[in-house]
Image (tube, grey):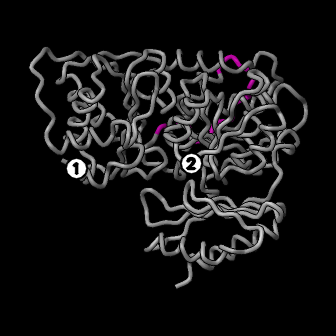
Amino acid sequence: MGDLAKIFKAYDIRGVVPDELDTATAEAAGAAFVRVTGASAIVTAHDMRESSVPLSEAFARGAVSQGADVIEAGLGSTDLLYYASGSLDLPGAMFTASHNPAKYNGLKLCRSGARPVGQDTGLAEIREMIENGVPAYDGEPGAVTRRDVLKGYADHLKTLVDLSSIRPLKVVVDAGNGMGGHTVPPVFEGLPIDLVPLYFELDGTFPNHEANPIEPENLRDLQAKVRETGADIGLAFDGDADRCFVVDERGEIVAPSAITALVATRELAKHPGSSIVHNLITSRAVPEIVAEHGGTPVRTRVGHSFIKQTMAETGAVFGGEHSAHFYFRDFWFADSGMLAALHVLAALGQQHGPLSELLGEYTRYAASGEINSEVADQAAAAGKVRAAFEGRPGVAIDELDGLTVGDEAAGWWFNLRPSNTEPLLRLNAEAGDEATMAAIRDEVLALVREK
């Protein structure tokens, strides 16, 4: 059995294979998942990692041993699994370690209708059941069947975004040898898109670069190819293709906050007066633009379980995170990088200007991006930063998620929050101009990294 203490995270199960996560653990997880959900059938999908097939097959053995039928969708992206869970109204299991290096794998679970399973919504119970031994089931075992849902997924996404009148576009896509290489071709089929593929070969060893587009070095090949081919836009997907990053026609990286604001205005045009959820690290341009377009901005903590829960509570039509996770009410409140990409392509293709010009109105402030600092005592370092800013005239502090400090009149804010999984503090800072942002960023980093 694997190392349960290490692999059970806030939102998923993830670890090094086979030292921390092995087939015995996956089999027990399959059995426990069926008991916790009470499901008579479940659906699974997996990414292109070498360990994904053995782990998903072991999970299926555990599930059928508890009397549940298993529908295997086979190779897919995480949002394809959400589509399967939503359209079939079944609990789902996705085998992927997303953007993590090749030696990792993991498991993202959801209830029927793609509702998330996290620590408070079943994950802790599953872990406890695995630790104590999953009770035996004395009925008939379930059956395993295969079902290809790729075409259904592609067709469904294209019902959610109107691409019928877009102009021809040249689009470079960097799949990073991840699942975008599998899902992009059928989604783009029939659209007036000249696709320039980069690293579409499915390869869980990631021979070209890590499939983690939040790191700028992993976008360099995409930026170069956009410039070289004179493309209209570049798209980069992470390993399980649930996140999408955008590069404009100049090869410049577009902040996910600008994409959040763009998609928000499109959804508000379809659903006037709706709520839009954004996490507290997105640019303050997002709530400003939402309000200007007649929507209600709703601020939430970082993390998909908080976003999805808040969206369900408020009936929000859309939600966006600084990390390029984009959530849609019409997609079972789940996140889909592909659906966000289609919105951007629709907006770009319905007018004649370049992407940089289109996004100009959604980009208002200078942002640091997320900067990580390795810190042994996260609470002490954050406390030191709080003490340095507390009591300064005009400064407001809140602790909805980590430490958020801002001066509205001076036009700057920063958030400092601990990682859930590593000894890191993550800093995001924003201001009205580059110099102010840099000064705040450097002051906070000096305090955090002070020995």
Question: Residue type at mark 1?
Answer: Gly
Q: Residue furthest bottom?
A: 451
Circle 1 Cα neighbour tier, 10 Å, few/some/many (<14 / 14–19 / ≥20): some
The residue positioned 30% from the left and 43% from the top of the image is 124
Q: In the image, is residue 428 above or below residue 66?
A: below
User: What is the secondary structure assignment of the residue under circle 1?
Assistant: loop
- Residue 272, image x, y percentages: 77, 23
Question: Residue type at mark 2?
Answer: Arg
The range drawn in magenta is 189-202
**Residue highlighted by disc 1:** 2
Q: In the image, is residue 392 above or below residue 399?
A: below
Circle 2 Cα neighbour tier, 10 Å, few/some/many (<14 / 14–19 / ≥20): some
- Residue 3, image x, y percentages: 24, 53
Q: Which mark is residue 338?
A: none
Residue 217: quadrant of the picture: bottom right
User: What is the secondary structure assignment of the residue under circle 2?
Assistant: loop
Front one among 52 and 11: 11
In primary-sequence order, the first of circles 2 and 1 is 1
Front one among 1 and 54: 1
**Residue highlighted by disc 2:** 301
- Determine whether, in the image, residue 382 is placed left or right of residue 131: right
- Determine whether, in the image, residue 38 is placed left or right of residue 286: left
